[in-house]
Amino acid sequence: MFDTISYIFKYIFILIMYLFIFGVMRLIYLDIKSMRGRNTGGDGSHPYLKLLNRREHLNFKVEESYTLDKDLSIGRVADNNITIADPFLSKRHAKLSVRKGNVYLEDQNSKNGTFLNGKRLERGIEAPLQDGDKIRLGNIEFLFIKAQSEPQSKVQNEV
Amino acid sequence: MFKVLYKHPVNLVMAANIAAYAVLFLFRQPFDRNALLICLLVSGVVCIIYYVVTGLKLGDEYLFLIVSMLFTLGLAMIYRLDPQLGQRQLIWFAVGLTLFFTSYLLFSKIKIWSRLGLFYAAGTFLLNIITLVFGRKINGSTSWIVIQGHSFQLSEISKILFILFLACFFKDGESGMIEIPGLKLIMGHLRKDGNEKTQIRPKASGVRGLRAFITRETQNRALLMAVTFINAFLMILQREWGTVALFFILYITILYVFGKSRLFLLCNMACTVPVALFGYFFINHIKVRVDIWLNPWSDPSGKGYQMLQSLFAIGSGGFLGTGLGSGRPDLIPAVNTDFIFPAICEELGIMCGIAVILLYFILFYRGVKIALNQSERFYRALSLGISVMFGIQTFIIIGGVIKLIPLTGITLPFVSYGGSSLVSSFISLGILQAVHPSPRVISSPGIEEAAENG
């Protein structure tokens, strides 16, 4: 009786151990990607979105920053320009359009809404973005950076 | 279900606890209620502390997670082998956790640690000398202090002090050590003895050569070597071979990573060779260990008994093990402390053994990552030193019990039974946790940090 139980539980135990290692490895993978991701930030010639969350706290893949050199759509499904598997995002959540150097944010009838500096965007309204605006969608928060900052140091890429 | 589990690894620690103690509950007749109690206690404490660490953002959250998994496995194994030791280990766990938070607070709030270099050196000496004078001989080494029936191993604490000392040495390009006026005076005095004219006519040409020779760096290096080798000598007198090996490998590693001079590194390595050779040829104990390593069958029922039992245990476990409670790991002498790894391998299989090694790999990786994120050299050397210490300790003992290298008695951090070992491991973990940079530092990657890595 005891032998049978012990026999079954050893498989369970080994499975648990490896699931644990798998889980931690996955977090490490996201972690290393975030170390590499630092250099993909704005190159200075385009406005960009910077992630404000610590990526280690997010359970899905997000880049550290997204360059806004063309119109971008954000959502959960793969045909968006930016696909993020955040469960609180809608399939097609929001759209960023770039016109004459200005960037406009528009909510795409998302369920949980798009927040600009803490205020929920009205349906069908294109809000112009200012430098330093905070955009929140689902779990994630971005900082909009428009300033034509100096190109980032190359040294940083070698971290 | 699995998705939820592996995305929140703390659940898996609890699942492991439940699985292990469910078996242990049924293991003894009558059913062992204490096993369930321990299960509840450990998973509760682990869960609470994990949420405290993540909730209050006390540094890296994976360190504690990995360690709690290792501890869970170790405690379950110890409890299976000897319930009383298991309960005592649980008390040490509580003490360890208290000290974990204490050292976390001390290291994150007080910033004087990098200036105490000589105190650390003095501390290691003091601990070693106390051990030599008052030490009791247990299991062949005189490294135990016995107070009212409880035995402690002070060398575990001196390990941490030694790492702090090394970190102080490398904090400022190898010349940051001597900051205490007293020592400067002594050094100056020594130099004066060497050449009377030094103080009177410092510009004299003959003297300048000598002065250039005895630069601050050279003095510091001499001090470093003196501290290391005298410490090692004191530990050799205690017959603490495992700790001596740990000290030397740690020392050489840190020197290799942070040292500026290859010559000094080579010189140090050259100095360790005669020590090792001397040990092999003149000290019977080491010779026996090496002989057993080469051929355990030369004396299967005597000197080679432990080694062979360990190999039999691993062998009889096979890939998936015999199941918790169905093997005979108790045949191995010292199975609770040094030989816990073969016991795990026998009952839970080499798959679980490999998992343990992987866990240490991840722990080491987190430590190195913390070291890389530091901007101050002191903290960088400190965190690297601690993670290297965990790594080497694991290598020495696991390599020893699977007959990969000669066996030296040392504990498997967080898994083996042993109060002082567990406590010192938790103190080191607290330091590592405190050294971890705050989120603010991470989100704005500093260029100076990158430049220093180059």
Image: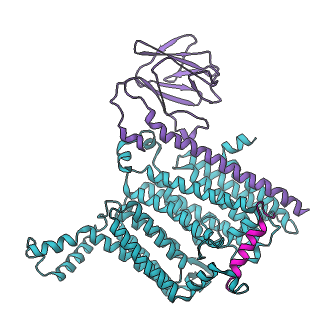
Chain colours: A purple, B cyan
Q: Which is nearer the eye, B360 or B12? A: B360
Task: Name, please, the residue furthest toward the top.
Answer: A124
Indicate the quadrant containing the N terminus of chain B: top left, top right, bottom left or bottom right.
Answer: top right
Q: Quadrant of residue B189?
A: bottom left
B201 vs B37: above or below: below
Q: Going by the image, does A158 lie left or right of B10?
A: left
Indicate whether residue B306 is drawn in magenta: yes
Q: Quadrant of residue B165?
A: bottom left
| The magenta segment | B303-322
x then y, percent, for residue B83:
75, 70
Q: Which is nearer the eye, B137 or A85? A: A85
Q: Going by the image, does B338 lie left or right of B268?
A: right
Q: Going by the image, does B246 lie left or right of B256?
A: right
x then y, percent, for residue B7:
66, 42
Q: Which is nearer the eye, B236 or B427? A: B236
Q: Going by the image, does B145 lie left or right of B206?
A: right
Indicate whether residue B26 is drawn in magenta: no
**Residue under the point 65% across and 67% down:** B91
x then y, percent, for residue A97:
49, 15
B418 vs A91: above or below: below
**Residue under the point 62% across and 79% down:** B294
x then y, percent, for residue B352:
71, 59
How many discs appear? 0
**Residue under the point 63% across and 56% down:** B358
Q: Quadrant of residue B312?
A: bottom right
**Chief SS of the magenta region:** helix
Q: Does any portion of residue B125 appear in the rendered image? A: no
Q: Which is nearer the eye, A17 or B40? A: A17
Q: Does any portion of residue B26 appear in the rendered image? A: yes
